[in-house]
Image (cartoon, rainbow, N blue to C red):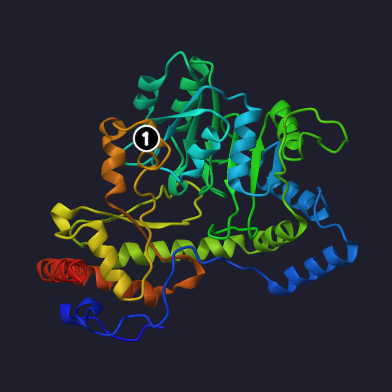
Amino acid sequence: MVSKEISTVKDLAIFGADPAFSQYKMVGVPNIGNRGLLFSYINDILDRKWLTNNGKYVKELEEKIRVMLGVKHAIAVANGTVGLEIAIRATGMTSEVIVPSFTFVATAHALSWQGIIPKFSDINRNTYTLDEEGIEKNITEKTRGIIGVHVYGQPCNIDQISQIAREHNLSLIFDAAHAFGNSYKGRPIGNFGDAEIFSFHGTKFFNTFEGGAIVTNDDDIAEKCEYMRNFGLGNGEVSKYPGTNGKMNEVSAAMGLVNLESIDEFVKINKRNHMTYRRELEGIQGINLLEYDEREKCNYQYAVIMIDENSAGLNRDDIMRVLKAEGVQTRRYFFPGVHKMEPYKTMFPDMDKFLPITEMVTARVLALPTGTSVNDEEIEKISQIIRISVAHHKDVKAKLIRDYTNDSST
């Protein structure tokens, strides 16, 4: 509920006014479809006493995803990270694999967990996805693969990256955690590379409580993934490949089936929120909303702004502190860059010198609340807080510095 009007800088909570929101506005609140239908599925699962191991609901979810995306194979897994790990092994990646640092840390961890070195490469300043020229420069005799990340659902330059992979005989997979339901040149994401991996974590606009899927049009890779998610056993008793326990359970699959029925409504709400942010943030100096290609299908899962301190007078962390005081949670998504996290920070201590665009973007990016948890009025209020803050950036900056100084001295 919006509790106050904000028309002057003194109406901001950092100056002692009441917060704009009595309950926190969050980033990534789970979407939940028809509860009655979900409970009926769960009751059926309990009655049938088939809780996991490739049951009825997992098979149905896989088939619906396969048809929706127009792919040959969809393999449901326990989460997106294990999906990455399985796909990495199934596609034969070893030694060194090129990957962006501007991603969630799981993308790199899925490699290093298997003894593979992530070779960090810089991103495009407009799309925040892997820069093709950077990929070419980073290929060595040890390179065995490329993992592209469709950041915020924006597809990589798939055609060019695929061509590079073919020319150098490299395995290619895409981390499509953000891109379920999106398209590239009219084709659904999921149809590219050797395989693509989705996350259905609770924070994603489409969730299965916790889960994910590997999708591929390669029969051999699909077989390996199906075996590897079940200890290497497939549906038999004899191990065929090294495997793990990466199966999705029946309750998660039931949640996925329920949410698939509401997915168009979730996207409609996300797009409405995006358009409201676009309208309300327009003209604010130094604040730029990430735009999506409206010629393509898009889930509009993230509302992301880039903050240019030179123009706004405030940096990303200043805006974040102002909004937090008002009861608005934001996320520096992604910060600080995987190359500045362990073990990679120790492995590659000078990597920041080779990732200038990544360094710039991680210092400026901020994800705002969207999804079913916010409405137009609340988005207008969040945007007005940002507008007032930037318009009075000198007063806001001075107050933040005083508060920081006082906190440091106590």
Q: In which quarter of the image is the N terminus?
A: bottom left
Relative placement, left or right, of 284 versus 123 is: left
| Residue 369 visible in the displayed image | yes
Task: Indicate the secondary structure of the residue bearing disc 1.
Answer: helix
Percent x, y of residue 389:
19, 69
Whether 288 is drawn above or below 224: the answer is: below
Query: Quadrant of residue 259 in the image?
Result: bottom right
Q: Quarter holding the C terminus? A: bottom left
Tell me the amino acid under the disc marked 1: Thr
Q: In this view, does 71 lie above or below 366?
A: above
Q: In which quarter of the image is residue 40?
A: bottom right
Crowd band around label 1 with a 10 angstrom C-alpha radius: few (<14), some (14–19), many (20+):
few
Most extreme residue toward the front is: 410
Q: Is residue 1 left or right of residue 381?
A: right
Viewed as shown, does residue 400 lie left or right of 298? left
Q: Where 240 sits versus 378, above or below?
A: above
Identify the residue at horizontal 29%, vertical 30% (top origin): 354
Residue at image position (48%, 32%) is 158
Residue pointed to by mark 1: 346
Residue 334 in picture, x, y percent from top left? 38, 49
